[in-house]
Image (spheres, rainbow, N blue to C red):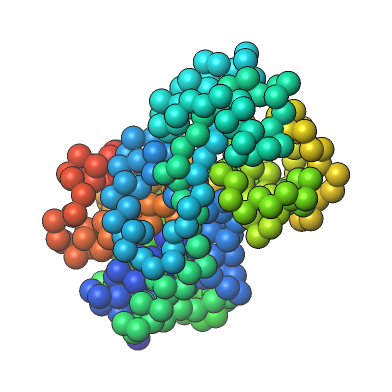
Amino acid sequence: MMHDFLIIGGGIAGVSAAARLSNLGSVLVLEAEAALAHHASGRSAALFEPRYGAPAVVGLSMASAAFFEAAPGVLSPRGLMLVAKAEAREAFERDVVAMEFTPISVEEARAIIPILNPETVALAGHATHAQDIDTDLLIQGFAREAKANGAQIVTRARVTAIHREGAGWRVETSEGSFTARMIVNAAGAWVDQIAVMAGVQPLGFTPYRRSMARIPAPGGHDVSRWPMLFGPGEDWYAKPDAGALIVSPAEEDLMEPHDAWADDMVLAEGLARYEEMVTEPVTRLISNWAGLRTFSPDRVLVIGRDVREPSFFWLAGQGGYGFQSCPAASQLAADLVGDRAPEIDADLVAQLSPARFG
């Protein structure tokens, strides 16, 4: 069967695109792993903070807000807190402006998160606009919509070769051979590798590792209502998760595409930065993991037809913004594929286009 759209990658980018494109034609999603969202999408901090990222990323995230507000149960209150030492005032003030924090006293901050150390925390800011994203609910909702419209999702289908064939493409995988009129490249850290297989010029995407550690609730506190906690310049963060706390060193270490794992030394350094700001030491880890956040050269998503090969569509470079931008990103993809006027403004469309790389 010749599909209209063959989507490579079953993370949030690929699955949300499948839901949108299934209204325009037949869709096949190929996922290399045994389940959807195995890599970056399954390892996300899962926060909707639309002010986070470069201006074009912020625009795309802001355009996603209406979808999230209308989706029952996908968002839940979380909030943000920024804390810093006195010597980090410059970085603290940049973050306050960029992410619209309200400065508060250390005493007010400790009333919200009682483990903050008054001997080291000199500056604090608070914001209520950030919300948790139920990532599983979001992914499964898009997958159900796609399947209801006839889309097929094939797992364990690692792409091994791609060939031009007549008016379309033949994609060879570990689960067999598939054909389609258009390829949608949503392969995360592997997007440039997929492009090379297809004979398309890669755009220079770079995957960076980010590690996470889950620790027990500090001091036995109920952390469920605590906001997500950041250091200045995002040099670490901590977030409540299922009765425990996730702590990340927020590193960006350049990696080759692979199934990432946490680096023990990097984790230790990040946990030390967190411990400096709190009164409760980290005595043990419940678990740890890592994911790859993949960026284009200008750290902005790439959404659009390849300049030289219009039947090859880029949906790539989500970085750390894939979940919070996916409603507008997938809608833009469908608008461009369907030759419809995009819902977002033309300037933003141009900032996301692969044409910006020449």
Q: Is residue 276 above or below residue 24?
A: above
Q: Is residue 314 above or below residue 57?
A: below
Residue 321 spot, x, y in % from top left: 45, 48
User: Would residue 169 be visible to someone looking at this image?
Assistant: no
User: Would residue 149 be visible to someone looking at this image?
Assistant: yes
Please name whichever residue, 331 or 302, is drawn nearer the observer in this view of the structure: 331
Tell which residue pokes out farthest to the left in this image: 341
Which residue shows up at 50% across the image and 62% down it? 134
Which residue shows up at 79% across the image and 38% down it? 280
Which residue shows up at 22% across the image and 58% down it? 336
264 on left or right of 13: right
Q: Quadrant of residue 186?
A: bottom left
Q: Is residue 180 above or below residue 352?
A: below
Please name whichever residue, 311 or 331, is drawn nearer the observer in this view of the structure: 331
Which residue shows up at 48% across the image and 53% down it? 77
304 on left or right of 321: left
Residue 157 spot, x, y in % from top left: 54, 74
Residue 257 spot, x, y in % from top left: 60, 51
Which quadrant is home to the N terminus? bottom left
Q: Is residue 39 above or below residue 139?
A: above
- Number of numbered markers: 0
Please name whichever residue, 139 or 330, is drawn nearer the observer in this view of the structure: 139
Which quadrant is home to the C terminus? top left
Residue 127 spot, x, y in % from top left: 46, 37
Q: Quadrant of residue 323?
A: bottom left
